Amino acid sequence: MRYRLALLLLVLGLAGVSVRGEAQFLSVDARRIGMGGLSLHRAGDLPRYNAAYRAVPPRPGERRAKVTIPVPLGLIQFFRDHPISQLGDDPLFHPDSAAFNPIELANLLLHPPLFLEVKAAPTPTNDVEFTIGKNELIIDLGEARVLVPSDQFGFGGNSRVLDLGYEFRGVRVGVMGWMHHDVGFRLDDSLRAVLKDAQPVQPNTLYNLLTDATAQTGFAPFVGYAGRVWGDTARGIYLGAALRYYLGAAYGHADGSAGFVTGDTIFGSPGPVEAVDALVRYSRFGNSLGKGVGGDVGVVYASGAVEFGFGINDIGAKLTWSDTRVDTVYWDAAGDSVVSALVANHVESTTEIPVSYIANVSLALGTGTTVGGNVLYNGRRTTIHVGGEQRVGLVALRGGVARDQRKKLQLGWGAGLYLGSVSLDVGFWTHSNSFSDERGITMATSISIY
Amino acid sequence: MRRILRFGLVVGAAATVAAACGEGRAIFNVDLYSFFLAGRDDTLHYTVPPGLSDTVTSDTLELTLLGGLQDSGVDSLRFTGTVAYENNTGGPGTIGFLVFFDTVKANVFSGTPAISVSGQAGPGNATTAVPFTVDVTGPLKDMFVQPTLFVGVRAIVTNPGAAVLDGRVRVTAFDMRLIVQERVF
């Protein structure tokens, strides 16, 4: 069981091999999913990443949903397959079960079953062969070798988990909750050769997985402004800006490696020795706050049917943590465990929240057709979305394409039925949010109330 | 063996999980002979008076194997190798070379041998090499997903001749191929 849990951790840790970033979890809105993740209307990514959109009025005839409620058909299916009363014995969550597969569990975490999976991405299958002798170890992953990353991989992103405020004449004062995490891994040359090229493990050699991980969270009081600075409602330029005072509540950073060192003989006495070496800096909740100043700016040009926008977030957001602790973490051979020791306490550390931005364009034709596209950088990787919607009476037809964070092309399509102040929407999208090179297809369903 | 499998597992786990290779039939090709200490682990000496039989038994050794595979199914288990009957004097005689496994130390030699190789010793100063290939079936193969296993080796030597039969049984090659239906990968 111990190694199965280790496997699971590795799965989660190495998830970036196949899956990169939370941004691939598109939305709970089937309308947006039906356009491949594009925020065509003034919701979703546009106001999130462009401070000016707060002041941009709706297009003529456009209605903004007051609320969108996902219809979680995927959860219904999931709990039918995995009854709550039997979760304790469910092989999916039971590492001692022979049927337990950490890949399946990782796929579940990476792609939560909120919506119905109409085509599950198949998990690649092939045998793994170990050739073992006293001074020999070869690991042959077969065709799966191509999935071993050659460069750094990982996951990360910024989230704004809270946005409360009061607005008056374009000026808004409030507080925002924020989270940032960035986890990166890299196989060193020796380990990569063993895994990717099935090279024999060599004596007296270090094999390492290099890790660089940061996670921080806090809140940020802000004051902002958004308004039209030129023109009128038919044709105008809108500017937005927000100045934020970032207060960090907790922070952790680890930089190090984990692996093993072989001896004169690979399986001689004492044999390979675990090697763990990392420096960890952290400040727990309740400790002194990290502090920093940053801001957002955005601009939108709207002229009739055409609209352009560009917004950038967290400019200059550098936090200073006045009281952090630094530990060294290493492998204790005598105790056969990982231990940590204090290096320094009450020292100052600094972190940054990476800049994120969005550039978008849209065209609303008088025929009920709206098309658009955007480029979104979420602080780690870039995604591109292009899509459109065609209204035909009570029905809306949607479609879109996206280049996801794995640089893979994904498709979205869907439809909506407008019934007064309610719309019933369905959207399909292909995705690569699993340990597979093949795409899955999710069917999202939601109800929007206007 | 402990180190073999522990190390192999760690590396293998990282590898296979990193590669995300699904179903996961794990195949272990282990050169067991390379772990033997020459002259100690690979050899049984025999000296049998004329007209008698004798049984030479090794010490029982404990093997620490993979942990966490107890619920997994063994798809197949095959041993291949070579036993050399290196006779010094006497003969010809017959030698049965037996390898036993069990999860209980006290029961090692009470069960059915997993490997049974027969051959001729002598006559005189002669070496007879007997290759073997054994596919282990039934409950015995399932022992190899247990975390601990005990192994014992026995040689049954029969000397029908008029001279003392003296020599040694020596393993010169010993490989294991274990295929496990294990979904951890």
Image (spheres, rainbow, N blue to C red):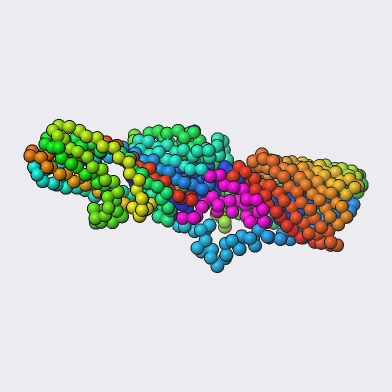
Q: Is residue B96 visible?
A: yes
Is A101 colored magenta in this rendering? Answer: yes
Name the residue at 59% across, 47% down.
A122
Residue lying at 47% horizontally and 35% vertically, measured from the top left: A198
Q: Which residue does the image show at 43% across and 43% down from the upper left?
A: B27
- Which residue is more in the foreground, A32 or B62? B62
- Give the percent coordinates (x, y) of residue A68: 76, 59
Query: From the viewer's perspective, is B67 left or right of B53?
Result: right
Q: Position of residue B179 (x, y in %)?
A: 42, 46
Residue A164 rendering spot, x and y as whole percentages: 73, 58
Q: Is residue A321 visible?
A: no
Which segment is the magenta one?
A98-125
Residue found farthest to the top: B125
Nearer to me, A113 or A214: A113
Question: In the picture provided, is A32 more to the left or to the right than B114?
Answer: right
Indicate left or right for A404 with A148 as reference. Answer: right
Q: Could you say which is closer to the camera, residue A184 or residue A117?
A: A117
Q: Nearer the viewer, residue A440 or B138?
A: B138
Give the left or right position of residue A226, taking residue A204 as reference: right
Count of numbered circles on the image: 0
Residue B145 shown in magenta = no
Q: At 15% from the left edge and 44% from the top edge, which residue is drawn?
A: B158
Image location (x, y in percent) of residue B1: 33, 45
Question: Can you say whether B139 is above or below A320 in the image?
Answer: below
